[in-house]
């Protein structure tokens, strides 16, 4: 097992090498719209997964996948020449789903913002069901601490309750 830091550095190097090789060595026009987004290498440095995105529709995605599969040998040979490991890792190409997920997330955020605007518009013209402060009004008197004396407390009922509890 290799150090995970070494595997991460190797993955970044493979990402750069593959991206350069797509532009330089592979003469297939289907790879022109491919962008290498990430690469990951297993800790034993035997397998590399390379993530890519394609600008275009579903047909362009399918063409790019076929072109990468066809050019896999040339790309692996180029990786073997430009990295310093005993065995050249196998390459696996995976379409990156981050842009798709990001667009879905953006759509959800737009929908939430639209709903928030609707609620704010409804709240702007809304009034309270009762008074603005239902606790202030007729029958509710405020008690000042100055009006309250300890002499006003009648403890006779409480004393009788305490005596009944002790029996």
Image: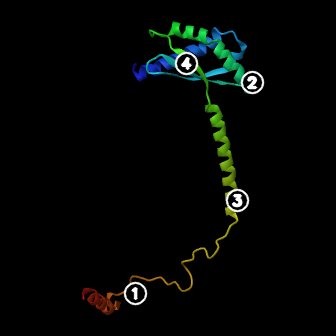
User: Residue 147, labelled with which disc?
Assistant: 1
Q: Return the disc, 3 or 4, that comes first in the chain's sequence.
A: 4
Using the numbered discs, state the Cα–Cα distance from disc 4 to disc 1 in whole angstroms.
81 Å
Q: Return the disc, 4 or 1, that comes first in the chain's sequence.
A: 4
Mark whose residue sits in front, 3 or 1: 3
- The colour mode here is rainbow
- Going 71% across and 22% down the picture, which residue do you hit? 62
Mark 3 and mark 4 in contact? Answer it, CB < 8 Å.
no
Using the numbered discs, state the Cα–Cα distance from disc 3 to disc 4 in whole angstroms.
50 Å
| Residue 121, image x, y percentages | 70, 59
Q: Return the disc, 1 or 2, that comes first in the chain's sequence.
A: 2
Q: Return the disc, 3 or 1, that comes first in the chain's sequence.
A: 3
Q: Classify residue 46 as left or right of residue 162.
A: right
Quadrant in the picture for the C terminus: bottom left
Q: Residue furthest front?
A: 167
Q: Return the disc, 2 or 3, that comes first in the chain's sequence.
A: 2
- Displayed quadrant of residue 123: bottom right
Using the numbered discs, state the Cα–Cα distance from disc 3 to disc 1 in whole angstroms.
47 Å
Mark 2 highlights which residue?
Answer: 59
Mark 3 highlights which residue?
Answer: 121
Q: Secondary structure at mark 3?
A: helix
Mark 4 highlights which residue?
Answer: 15
Q: Return the disc, 4 or 2, that comes first in the chain's sequence.
A: 4
């Amino acid at each position: 097992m290799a150090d995970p830091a070494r595997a991460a550095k190797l993955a970044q190097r493979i990402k750069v090498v593959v991206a350069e090789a797509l532009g330089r060595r592979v003469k297939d026009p289907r790879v022109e719209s491919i962008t290498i987004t990430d690469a990951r290498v297993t800790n034993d440095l035997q397998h590399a997964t390379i993530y890519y995105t394609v600008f275009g529709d579903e047909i362009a995605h399918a063409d790019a996948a076929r072109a990468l599969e066809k050019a896999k040998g040339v790309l692996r040979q180029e990786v073997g020449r430009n990295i310093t490991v005993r065995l050249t890792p196998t390459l696996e190409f995976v379409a990156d789903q981050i842009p798709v997920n990001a667009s879905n997330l953006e759509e959800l955020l737009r929908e939430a913002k639209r709903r928030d605007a609707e609620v704010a518009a409804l709240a702007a013209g809304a009034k309270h069901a009762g008074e603005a402060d239902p606790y202030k009004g007729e029958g509710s008197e405020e008690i000042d601490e100055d009006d309250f004396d300890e002499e006003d407390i009648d403890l006779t009922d409480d004393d009788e309750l305490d005596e009944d509890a002790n029996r």
